[in-house]
Image (tube, coloured by chain):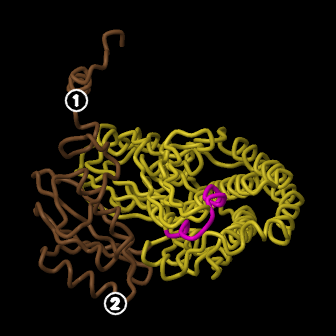
Chain colours: A yellow, B brown
Amino acid sequence: MSYIVPIGPYHPALEEPIHVKLYTEGEIIKNADVFIGYNHRGIEKLATKRNHIQVTTLVERVCGICSHSHALTYCLALEKIAGMEVPKRGQYTRVIVSELERLHSHFLWLGLAAHIIGFDSAFMYTFAAREDVMDMLEILTGNRVNYGINIVGGARRDFTKEQLEELLKMTDKIQEPFNNVKKILSSDKTTAMRTKGVGVLTKEEAWIYGATGPHGRASGMTYDTRRIDPYICYEDFDFKAIVLEDGDVFARVVLRILEIEESIKIITQAVKNMPDGPINLGVKLPRIPAGEVCIRTEAPRGELTYYVVTDGTMNPHRVSIHVPTFRNAATVPVMLKDNSVADAGLIVASIDPCFSCLDR
Amino acid sequence: MENSSIIKISREELVPLAEKMSSEKRRLIIMNGYIDKDGNNVVVYNFDLDGQIITYECIGYSTLPTVTHIFKGAAQWCEEEISEMMPIEFEGLDKSGRLFLPEEFDGTGQILVMPIDDLKKINENKGRDYSNQ
């Protein structure tokens, strides 16, 4: 018996609006369509009517999870057009916030994955660890969501020695809940049964759809922007770009767990090797000349690209934003095929989607 | 972060370029579109060349050949988005439905390009009451 099962765009189980149509035969999904665009906010258009300082604040609000990545990428674009070089301490400051953002994003996703699987004790461990990371972000930047740490030419505020010591203590403190999560999610039989072989995306399919970030790397794609095209000062840090081959939901879980360990390594190195000196080139915005540039960074969910066109005025002429979900959401129909309807929610969630980001 | 370069190409050069990039396993990072100060359509193709972004621009065309038969899913949503937001068509692109714009939206351009008063008029014609807003 064939059915069409519509999910969304407004549904109690969905945190953000998306519409998915599942074409099923009995319990098995034979095809699927994904419809986006329900949360289009016109941010790109609005950006052309604001000056560069306002746009830095505006793009930080594209996403509530990877807010820092957006402001950072926009600032990097302007700095490249203007030929500015950010002082080393400012670069380290940006790296620390980037990796804290990755930590809290990965913990968030692992918690949600555990919740969807039905493993709420693991959800609580991950959110306990995430809370410590969020508190740390508040201590360092003054904010838990939109950190406002980026300005064109560097970082907005410096970290004190005491704050950096607190940061190292935090990385020690989250070890216990993290180890519990790692043990539960990577070796528990129930988790494995629920995730292994589910929602498989092969390496070839990942290439065809341009899957990025942890989602692509769980399918064997080797692209980690921090490694292949180092920005800020990622070349200063010793860390591994994790790549797995299986391409199922289990691989996506394990990959994010391993990436958390690498992020903690980067934070520790950044604190220990934090250079002295200024954190920015001054708080006055320099005149940005006419130019255009494509900039990419490794946001927690994958490759974030900004194409910025300037015309020498105070406003950008064009700010084109593409978030990792723009790439990864297109892979959802491929992953859903031949899986059961009961796994659809987990498979959609496994890309770590942000549909509000996607719609801008 | 390597310095990126921008190369201008004609529409005739586009498909051979995409085929070359694909055969060399160069990734299509992203496509972007905008209208320049002179009113020309600009469509931008950004490829990954061993960690360096290399950018190709097609300027001033109202139609371009699709590259979805070469880069498939990696180009599909990009071309759909650009053709919704700008007055440009991709020849050969399978546009079976809308991407960002509402299905009943008639015309092209970003949604917010339409003044709010015009939007109200359209909706009033459909029987929606805005008198108390």
Q: Quadrant of residue A306?
A: bottom left
Q: Is A336 within the magenta? A: yes
- The chain that hosts pointer 1 is B
Q: Which residues are magenta?
A: A334-346
Q: Which residue is mark 2?
A: B23
Horizontal side of A215 relative to A60 (left or right) equals right
Q: Residues within 10 Å of mark 2 (few under 14, many from 20)?
A: few
Is residue A1 left or right of A309 when viewed as pictured?
Answer: right
Look at mark 1 in the image and give the residue it sits on: B115
Relative placement, left or right, of A173 versus A37 is: right
Image coords of residue A51 (percent x, y): 34, 39
Q: Report x, y in % for residue B116.
A: 26, 26
Please report, as a chain letter, where disc 2 is located. Answer: B
Main secondary structure found in the magenta portion: helix
Q: Is residue A296 left or right of residue A135?
A: left
In this view, the residue in front, A179 or A239, is: A179
Label 1 packing within 10 angstroms: few (<14), some (14-19), many (20+): few
Farthest-out residue, top:
B132
Q: Nearer the viewer, residue B26 or A233?
A: B26
Pick whichever, A97 or A2, lies toward us.
A2
Residue furthest to the front in view is A1
